[in-house]
Amino acid sequence: MKTNIIFFTISLLYINFLSAQNNQKEVLIVGTMHTVPTIVKNSYKPMLKRAVKYNPEAIYIESPMANDTISWEYLKEGWSNSYRAFYKKSDSFKKTRSFNETVFRKLAIKKYKELTKDEINYLIKSYLYNRDYGNYKLMIYLKTYGLKGSKKPTRNENGDLTFMLALIKNLKVLNMDDQQTNSEYHNAWRKCAESGAQNGDNDLNRKLNKRDYNSAIIPAIFGNLGRHTNKLKSLDRKHLLNSFRYVQNTNLDCENATRYWDERNFRMAKNIAEQVTQKEHKKNIVIVGAGHVIGLKEAFEKKYPELKIKLMYE
């Protein structure tokens, strides 16, 4: 009798464990090359194929969140011409136009193939009004290229991977980026580089960048740049460069650059995790610059252990 009770208890615990595993939400992090050279213009094709096979229920992209007023306060006059133009247009639109939430929600859940040209235009204006940069650009892409996307490679992760995936899976995108301290990061970067020119750390930077470039040549020639970029060795190297962890003669500026980079990754992870928790989606894909992948993975594992984190070619 005692043996039966023990066996039953163990079986019950095992069943509960399997159930928890099956219900665990997962996040697949995909590192991108942003814009690729013309000679390797088709680099995103294998990555798109793999992303489609993963069959995500939600797509998170490296784009500022609409309600992140701190990031937009910087971006409206910041480094990106595209963000500056978008903010100006959105700000003007909010002041001069009205927004119909009911109509917007009705159109936002329609399948792409069911949308008319007028409805696509309405959604473009609605996302502009809501300061939803990711979906604003997605709808412009749909309007420009149609349901099958661009016939020619755009050489950028949005046109060749993110938006193509969204159209194939009939999904909108979810913004998750954070650029609240981007100005401080770039200032610390500049000052760290100035000291690096004197103490030899810039030589280390050049060596790492050269190693990164040279190691990608053969994979790129054979159409495997995406796979190479997402190998752990490549991701670690990009993490070292972007977080200034290669620096041997550290100082306050270099330490600040590391801190700002890490903090941004932790805030991005928070933006993603909060949305994943609130939504029912089990399979989530994050499409982000490759330099962020290791930082995001570490942030998830430290702060959100309930999520299963996967890398694209792990």
Image (cartoon, rainbow, N blue to C red):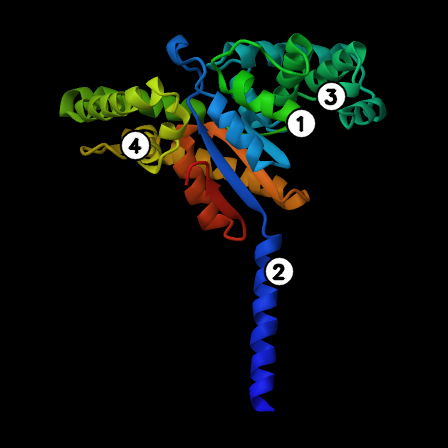
Badge number at residue 112: 3
Instruction: Tell me the distance, in whole angstroms, between the alpha carbons under discs 2 and 4.
Output: 37 Å
Which three-letter amino acid code belongs to the residue tagged 2? Ser
Instruction: Tell me the distance, in whole angstroms, between the alpha carbons under discs 3 and 1.
Output: 10 Å
Disc 1: which residue: 172
Which three-letter amino acid code belongs to the residue tagged 4? Arg
Give the answer, above or below, for where 163 lies relative to 278.
Answer: above
Does residue 238 appear in this view? yes
Disc 2: which residue: 19
Residue 1 on image: x %, y %: 61, 91
Name the residue rendered at 53%, 22% in the picture. Answer: 161
As drawn, which residue projects farthest toward the bottom? Answer: 1
Residue 296 on image: x %, y %: 45, 38
Badge number at residue 237: 4
Q: Quadrant of residue 151?
A: top right
Give the answer, above or below, for where 188 lies relative to 232.
Answer: above
Badge number at residue 261: none
Which three-letter amino acid code belongs to the residue tagged 1? Lys
Disc 4 on helix, strand or loop?
helix
